[in-house]
Image (spheres, grey):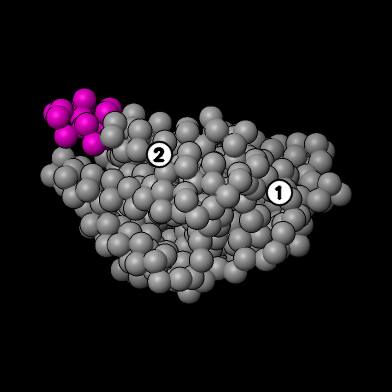
Amino acid sequence: MAEKKVTWLELFYDLLFVAAVSKASHVLLHVEHGSFSIEYLAKFVLIFVPVWWAWVGETLFVNRFGQDILSHRIFLSLQLFFALIMTASLSVHFDANYMPFLCGYLGLRAMTAIQYLSLYKKETGDKRRTARYFGTSFWIGLVISACSLFFDSWVRYAVLYAGIVVDILLPLISRRILVKTPINTHHLLERFSLFALILLGESVVSILAVLQSDSWTWQSVLFAAITFILIIAMWWQYFDNLEKKVDKSIRTAGQTIIYGHLFIYLSMSMLAASIQLLFLEQLDYFAGIYFMFGTLLLYFLSTSLVFNMYKHRQHRLGFSHFALLLGTVGCFFALDLLFVVPNYLVIGEVMAFFILYARTTA
């Protein structure tokens, strides 16, 4: 498969999604009485998923059909406008901003569907069938979500997300069609890794929040230093695997990359929030431990799944190494439940895990 390079326009497209991801992540910083509110945790997921799916939709179109030509630039510019509307509307107070959010999301998805339809008559064979399928079927989810305008209260959101779920499930249902027009693995991995880099930037911002606290103490400096090493190890583990261990010539529908990265991205955002919450001690000790190690486990399992599916056989994570890493998480978690330890030791345990994970896999 010929190498497909990421264009400057795609990188420009990512800029607005940086702001959208940041706004979604900040929802997690709303803590009530030392514990997470289920409401805010749910809002984080419900805000993050449409942002992720809108970005994925255009990324997959570009991967299979995109060309750096005038018509594509016009479509992408229109999508940037709708992304701007959607990003501006993201807030924990969803009701007040529902209309602009809906307009932004529907506009983004509609532009992607129209792009597929515009190519339908130009393509031949399997590519023609894929363009026709996406160009027509994506309107099902769009129509369902648009019907939310006719409802109030929680029913509105149930209808909105029913449409989004249908939209997300359609490619899974039609996998037999998609495998005949495989994704460009090299390009797709590069696009998803660039988005991961954006989310790593959120963790760097969390370090700045630590260093900009009212007074510097040896504990705060130590916490920031350990967190910095943690992020470097996390970067090392992810990007070394991506660059050196993954077989980019594999021809698949790419669904493990696509859906697996949703959980990788969620865990990265949650880690960025947990760094701030742990340092500021806004969470109850045990709530903070559950959140931090739950986030760590989600990242470990999702990255193991995605990379093992695409790694060369000799580089895949073996059962013994998987058990070692899982046992390390379990031991640290049990230790912190038995003994109350300071925040810099908790973040030190997370750092130690990422160093071990990078050393074992990268």
Q: Residues within 10 Å of mark 1 (few under 14, many from 20)?
A: some
Magenta range is 145-161
Kind of residue at badge 2:
Thr
Of residues 35 and 250, which is closer to you in this image?
250
Tell me: 354 left or right of 137: right
Question: In the picture shown, does residue 246 fall above or below 44?
Answer: below
Residue linked to disc 2: 136
Can residue 146 be found in the magenta stretch?
yes
At x 54%, y 41%, the residue is: 129
Mark 1 and mark 2 residues within 8 Å of each other at the beta carbon: no
The quadrant the N terminus occupies is: bottom right
State which tag comes first along the sequence, 1 or 2: 2
Q: Position of residue 355 (x, y in %)?
A: 68, 57
Q: Position of residue 194 (x, y in %)?
A: 53, 63
Q: Position of residue 233 (x, y in %)?
A: 64, 61
The quadrant the C terminus occupies is: bottom right
At x 47%, y 33%, the residue is: 170
Q: Secondary structure at mark 1?
A: loop
Q: Position of residue 29 (x, y in %)?
A: 32, 49
Can residue 226 be found in the magenta stretch?
no
Q: Residues within 10 Å of mark 2 (few under 14, many from 20)?
A: few
Tell me: 307 left or right of 192: right
Residue linked to disc 1: 251
At x 36%, y 62%, the residue is: 75
Kind of residue at badge 1:
Arg
- Identify the main secondary structure in magenta: helix
Of residues 222 and 85, which is closer to you in this image?
85
Q: Secondary structure at mark 2?
A: helix
Q: Does residue 163 appear in this view?
A: yes
Residue 46's label in the rendered image is none
